[in-house]
Amino acid sequence: MNDIQYVGVVGCGLMGAGIAEVCARSGLDVKVAETTGEALELGRSRLTNSLGKAAERGKISEAERDSTLARLSFTTDLGEFADRDLVIEAVVESEQVKTEIFQVLDQVVTRPDAILASNTSSIPLVKLAVATSRPGQVLGIHFFNPAPVQQLVELIPALTTGDQTLLRAEKLVTDVLGKHAIRAQDRSGFVVNALLIPYLLSSIRMFESGIASREDIDNGMELGCAHPMGPLKLSDLIGLDTVASVAFSMYEEYKEPLYAAPPLLLRMVDAGRLGRKSGHGFYDYS
């Protein structure tokens, strides 16, 4: 019997909405929080549209769509998370912002055995854990975009995470959400991004230096290595600001040149060319 029934998700951007959808489709009661009413309505629309498309494509029935929507509620007040068994933070990749959220959650979530989790892709979990009075109940639960489709979830215990917390999280991810869980040590990048980010940065350096065109770089990896998506297209999908943030975090930890963000990437982020979400990155999506 799953002991986690009430889930909170902080943030309803692409990742937060996807995580909320996965949990609600799995039969859990899900409350989603955003900072403003406008952001909340945008997130609600994102969730509604995603479930509508899933029903149209026959991935779920109309009845399942309606029951999933009924299990979702929305708020701008983290105080409404008092009864949650698990809260997953999925906001901007900023250590300061995430730390402040964990400090608030520590105050408002009243269940003594509640788990506080982060969807961070690079920030050390121990820094978030020690910002709370319950470091044994904090860990990373890292989903991949788009969360309803991607089967992998990384579980990252901090040095402080209790064994029972990790086991409960793993049981939820595998038995309830139906995902494949892998465990990673609390090192920046974990498993997937520790391998992926240097590859993406290398492709950006190759394009920046004029060795090959963006199309030839992407076609080379798609047609030559059977990758479903080339590295520049994938960077656009992830978000160039996210790629840069993860690179920064990994460089801070390891001081390895291969983790340093190329100047072109930094200039594109400064220009607001963030990839698909802004309509323009290495490719034009407008």
Image: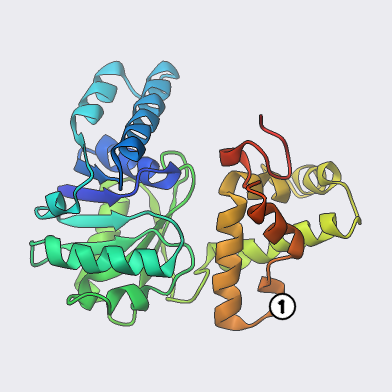
Q: Residue at x 55, y 65 (%)?
A: 246
Establish if 74 lies above or below 108: above
Closest to the observer, 109 or 79: 79
Establish if 48 lies above or below 195: above
Percent coordinates x, y for residue 236 in the rendering: 64, 45
Residue 230 visible? no
Percent coordinates x, y for residue 91 in the rendering: 39, 54
Percent coordinates x, y for residue 59 in the rendering: 40, 25
Q: Residue furthest right?
A: 211
Establish if 251 lies above or below 6: below
Three-letter amino acid code of the residue under disc 1:
Pro
Percent coordinates x, y for residue 61 in the rendering: 31, 19
Quadrant of the rendering where the C terminus is positioned: top right
Establish if 48 lies above or below 86: above
Image check: 240 left or right of 202?
Answer: left
Q: Quadrant of residue 97?
A: bottom left
Q: Residue at x 91, y 56 (%)?
A: 211
Q: Residue at x 22, y 74 (%)?
A: 132
Image check: 6 left or right of 88?
Answer: left
Q: Quadrant of residue 284?
A: top right
Judging from the image, what secondary structure is the residue with disc 1 in? helix
Q: What number of labels is visible? A: 1
Residue 29 visible? yes
Find disc 1 in the rendering and name its residue: 257
Q: Residue at x 55, y 81 (%)?
A: 253
